[in-house]
Image (cartoon, rainbow, N blue to C red):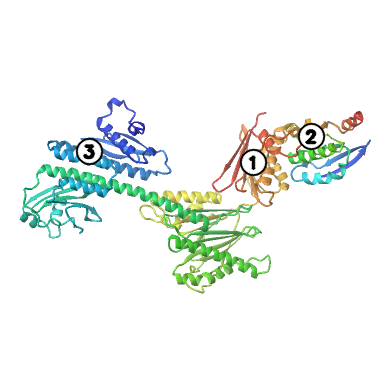
Amino acid sequence: MDFTTETVNGVTVVTLQGETLDASNAKALKTDLVPVLAPGAKLVFDMKGVRFVDSSGLGALLSCLRQVHSSGGDLKLCEMGKAVRALFELVRMHRIFEIYNSRDEALRSYSAGA
Amino acid sequence: MNPAESCTTIPKEDPKTVPPALSKLVEFFGQRLASEPFGRDLSVSAGLLPAGGSLPEGAVCVDVAEGCRAWARLSSLRPECWPAGALAALARGWGEAYASNEREILLMEELAVDWESLQALYDLSADLQSALRPQEMLKRILGRAISNEPALRAVLLVVRDGVLGPRAMQNLDFCADLDPAVGLIGQCVSEQRSLVLQGHDQIAAAGTPNEPWNGSTSLALVPITTAARGLFGLIAVWRYDGAPGFNSYFVRLLEALGQQAALIVESDRLNRTLLESERLRQEIFIGSLIQQLLLIGAPPAASVRLEVANLALPSQTVDGDFIDMFAHPDGTLDVLIGDVMGKGIPAALLGAATKTHILRALAEKSLELSSGETPSPEDIINCASDAIGTDLVTLERFVTLCYARVDPTARRLTLVDCGHPSTLHYCAQTGEVVPLRGDGLPFGVLPGERYIQIEAALEPGDMLLLYSDGVTEAKNPQKELYGEERLTATLRICSHLSAAGLLSEIRNRVMEFCGDEPLGDDFTCLALKIRPDHAEPAGEVTILSSYSDLEKMRHWASSTLEGDAASELGDEIKLGLTEVIVNVIRHGYHEEPGHPIQIRAEHDAKSLVFYVEDWAGEWAMASIPEPIFTGEQDGGFGVFIVRSIFEDVILNRSEDGRNILRLSKSRKK
């Protein structure tokens, strides 16, 4: 799964490009994201284009979250589709991740906290 | 446990109206149940047979009183150990024993005037319940007949293979067989009545010199008949000392003793039959172990293009049928089926040796060729024949076999036939079955025989059936053979089934044809089916064990959901199925690519039902504990998700080793 990154006010916005994050590409994505997960990084994952995530995809996101948390950074999700949101709720991960409806809301949460 | 109470059932009439005669029958069967070690497996039902009424299946009919006929039937709590035929035979034996017992009671009533005789019969009845060997009991019966008087001689003659042979005797040493048609015996048998003769001259005139009582002065000769077997034998008692002869009471006593002797011999025969069948069961068990371990190769995992199944039922003696399969990396499959002439362990070992030689020939020929090339079936067979053929000629044994190579990609069959029954080829396009047969001789007939392969084109949906002659030579009770024609018809009718389904249908049809007739030969067959490609029915999809096929599966799943595809329900189904397939690939196939996973939809108005089938051997979706929801762990959610989404998740294993997971979810929110 490809992704693009841009930096807005010190926050790295990662836009996932591709409709599916499942067992077929979760491992590769985790490897590809390593450079982005710098110590103390402030991250927003924009999930707008992602229409399907399975437990392997979720595992990749969780792994990123833990890595960022351990180095004092943060990872927030936004623009999540209905089906993906349902998965997060099913396994209660909406309580672990900070999830925002829009990319702006996610960015604002960083400046409010800062 | 009192079996007369707990195991027997009296017909559901008012107990008061049950005739005493029927109660006696039920009681008799109950006693037998109690005295047999296997009695607790069985139960008895019985009833009266109305005039013109038909006998219930497997029941025996017994005269319980003048003009009163009853039936009795055994049933088993463990039907797998007691086939209907065995139960019917046992019931028949007990029915005969009952009839004989009844006759004895009648005789005893008549004999009541003679206390001494009555006492003798009571003692013997007690003996019958004891565990004496049959020979001892028969000798004791004869001892009673002569009241252990040294001047008297006695013999029990029993019919076997058309002659009368001595089975037990007292004060006598006699071993010749006697013709039941001549002399005093002939007279006694043809008139079916007891004879009492007095005086040397009279006996000498009517008898023949080889009868043991030749030269005696008094003789009583009593025929023994049983309801089921007609003439059973004779009891003879005689003396040489001119003392007064035998009266009619004595003859009645001999008749009663004769019935008891018949009872003992018959019950002994029945017991032996039971023991024999137990011994046979053991032998079959050992035979089947040898077959499964040494001779019958396991089918490789099914590929996307080819289904394989085999079936091997050993007969009562170990045979040398063998099967082997070699899967090539490109999906081509070689199969081998063979049959060693002869039976027993030597045949089984020869079967194993032949298999080994062919495997070795395959390896040797492969080494000679440059890498990537595969030796042709005829090269393999000629090489193996050179190695083992001469030995087989020396041993005067021969082996028929068929080596077939099925290339499902090139759709080509290459086959070498070494005197084996025809391979049957069902052609899906024409609907016809073509027998494929070469003209090679069996291994071991002619040293130096050259084998030539034949070829045939295969199409999707085609089936191949290879079998040993045990299948076509299975006999029914009329000794007719099942034959290639019936097998061909079965293949044509069952061509829509899977390879495993075809074999199970062949088994059922042959067993039905044979009835009670046991298999005389090993029953071995192997079926292959070329899977139809791209022509998957709408309700079914086959994907391969790699994660890149998940999208294809989800696409297919959406198509089965129609209007629900874009709904929340559709999202859940796609997620649930993805988790299941990922589990199959990860834990079933250990992420080895190229294995098939078949998914089938059988929705109805109320619920969505999916079947996910794999050939990954025994594994089950782990029943892992509740996942950790704190975010400390990446995995462990898959099974939880599956169980949350589907209301029912049921795993079954089919006979041919598939895992079939049934997933269902109701349509309502």
Disc 3 or disc 2, which is closer to the eye? 3
Query: Looking at the image, which residue is at 42% across and 51% down?
Result: B282
In the rendered image, the vertical position of residue B479 relative to residue B366, given as above or below: above
Q: Mark 2 and mark 1: span between their CA atoms?
A: 29 Å
Q: Is residue B352 above or below residue B495?
A: below
Per the rendering, the mark at residue B106 is: none
| Residue B478 appears in the picture as rendered | yes
**Disc on res. B102:** 3
First in sequence, mark 3 or 1: give its number.
3
Q: Nearer the viewer, residue B429 or B187?
A: B187
Residue under label 2: A81
Observer-nearest of B129 and B383: B129
**Mark 3 touching mark 1, by CB under 8 A?**
no
The kind of residue tagged 3 is Glu
* Element carrying mark 2: loop
- Give the residue type at disc 1: Met
Is residue B48 at least partly visible in the picture? Answer: no
The N terminus of chain B, quarter of image = top left
Is B357 on the left-hand or right-hand side of B517? right
Q: Which residue is mark 1?
A: B621
